[in-house]
Amino acid sequence: LFFLIASIIVFLETTAKAQATLTHDISIRPLASFTTDSEGDRIANDAFEDPTGLAFSNDGRKVFVTNKYVTGIHKCLKMMTLSTPYDLRTASLVVDQADPLETKALLTGINDIKCTDIKFSKDGLKLFLGNTTGKIHGFELAEPFELKGLTYSSNVTSDLGGDATFSFSNDGKKLIYLDGTREGQHIDEYSLSTAYDLTSITLVNTTDLRTTANLSSGQDHGMAVEFSQDGMTMFVLINDDTNNNNTSLDSVFQFSLTTSFSTSTATMIGSITLPGKLSLRTYGIAFSGMGDKLYIINDGADVVTQVSLSCNYGLVACVSDPRSSLGTQVQLAKNNISMNTSIIFKRFEWIKRNKNSNNLNNLTASITSDNPLLNYWVKKFPDKLLSVNEKVKDGHSITIGPKDINNNKLDNFTTAIKLDNPLLNSWMDKLPETITAYQVALKEKFSKNKKSDWLYWSFGDLTIGSYNGKSGGPGINLEKPKDIRTSGLTFGADKKNSKNNYTGYAIRYADGKSKFAASDPSTTMASLTLSYYLITPLKDSGYTNTVVGLSSLKYDLKTGGVVTGQRNGKQLFTSIDFRSDSEYGKFNLTPSLKIKHALTSLSDFTEFMTNTSSAATNVIYEKETFQTGDLATGFLFNSDPVKHSTGTVFHNGGLEFVYDYSPDITFEYSYAGSSNAQQYTVEKYSQKNIRANYGYENVYNNNFTLSLNYERFQHLDSDKFSHTDSFLIKVGHISEEDTQFAFDFDPLSNNSAKLSYTKNINNFNLKLNSNMDLFTQSSDYGANLEISSKF
């Protein structure tokens, strides 16, 4: 490839108050590949020789260029491939070429075979070439955007004037023709009774550029007419031959239309002058599919220059994209509901895993002794104790369960230690009564500090979604591809009301941002959500998990870093999960059936594009209320706990099929200064979806917990393939009432025995110590009670 300029930034002079910013990407002139073209000839010349027009395939991976110079081995139509869509920096060598005006239309005159412009039908099965006699010829393609096998069936216009330069409406039923003849520059709009049928066209409007664009010089020559994707903005290139084709006078005029592709509604909003750094004698322009790149066809140097625009179609003024904006607003609103319900349903699963856990009430005690005989006795205890745990140093660990946790918040316990020594048995028999007496005496004193029934939790989340663009048919982009990134923080509290019945509240703040691919405009949404949730057992078996939430939404629309619009919204949503008590397999699989429904109301607002450039057109949006919902069914799992040296791990997750039954949503908007209301219907990305998630929770020995969860929401519709990835993290600490119970026997020191009981209750340390000299003629024992706290 031949590169002219590496990278410069050019500020264009405009008739509007604001300046458009163009960044030069590259100027190219692809070389010959010396392969065989679709007509059987050798490709021996580079791509451009007096280039005039440029067009892309729908996917942006093929670029076609027309040339006026067709003498000898130069052909009028050349094709290159692009490894990155719409990026000429990735252009190949010339891989195909053709002369269809000569080889298929069988034209022989030198002016008849000079190509002046190129367009395709939206499905890529029709090719249209203009020539210097003012005619447009249509060709049929065997495969979309493939030159091999094209045919001609006399689909041609009469002489429409000047060098043929033209555009079609998206439906192919309007032909907009630029007659660039000096002193008579004008645009003719024709209607076609049959899409792309050039044999029967009817003139419906003529726009005189001499008055509309103030063209008066005899050197002004109209060279190209192009439109934005939605047909609401028109661009006209005027070449000025003054000063021997010094392009410092070549200009592009930008028009705003109130009706798509209707030139009778066009109003000029300004023009830019192309500097000589970008082009020497401009013969054509084109835009990328999203309008974020401008291509300048430079006849003076036989190159095509690619320029990145500061905003979509923003030569003179940035152009709003209401369809992409509305689609993004709906998706952000739906994502807010999904994340709030997803987080709380993961809390439901945590409660399910831990509702039968009694580790916060059980008491672990250690009996340590150097006496082999006493250790032997301890080995005989299992049938007399509540439970005997693993062996500890010089003894055994025993667990003593709570006596009545619902009646006594201080966790009374009953010992079941039985020894063959009558004296030790007598002392141990009195121990529970002694401790119980102390607890009863202290119960009233500590009632103000007793542990709350509420459990508190928090979650941090990060969601990254990639959404392909939506099309209204081949080659018609309704919504641009976009990425949505959302981060949130949730705080919640819940309590157990009775067996298997829980209620709780959660509040979540989230900040979401959507960025269109290779484009400047963005939409952000801040949300604040309050949710109420509960677990309710069913009469026969199973239970339901229910969430009801209310959200406040605030949208900010930005272009070039400038806020152009703000919109408020409210949401009311609910979700119910029907669950079974039955579990299957080693992963404890349980079936799940969820239904989710939401009502969202968005306010009316104005998108002030004039905040970015004074010549821009503002967009007025009407308020809208819409419903969304889905039905999900599948299996969830919670594995049994796996113990390791540093703690305990739980694995969890699920796989669900999600059917989105949301109806299509029709929005209304209009352009400032126009009475024509526009409508756009936002369709769901996919009706059929799969949601899969996997997570684990690690409870460490120091009571710190780390929970990680990954969730993938995959759209299954092939034409709208996109997905959302969510990452949730929870770092916490289990606040236990730390309890220690130890018995130490030392036969080398008068067979003395020591017993200690330590319990932490709401940061108050309750410590009971007792000592006794065993096997002496007169028993010596004592006890003391200590209560302490740190302030």
Image (cartoon, helix red, strand yellow):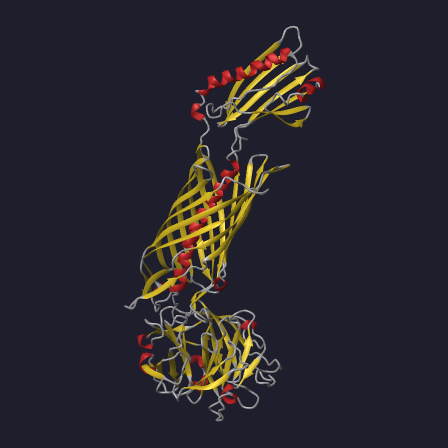
Q: Nearer the viewer, residue 589 or 775?
A: 589
User: Do we see residue 279 in this rendering?
Assistant: no
In this view, the residue farthest toward the bottom is 109
Residue farthest front in this picture:
540
Q: What residue sits 45% from the left and 44% below the top?
A: 578
Residue appearing at x 50%, y 59% in the figure: 716
Q: Position of residue 390 (x, y in %)?
A: 65, 28
Query: Looking at the image, is 135 positioned above or below residue 655?
Result: below
Marker count (numbered): 0
Q: Is residue 131 above or below residue 701?
A: below
Residue 576 appears in the picture as rendered: yes
Question: Is 655 situated above or below 279?
Answer: above
Image location of residue 354, percent across then percent down: 52, 36
Q: Quadrant of residue 444?
A: top left
In this picture, residue 69 sits left or right of residue 259: right
* Position of residue 320 measured from the top left corner of the image (x, y, whole percent): 38, 65
- The extreme left residue here reads 675
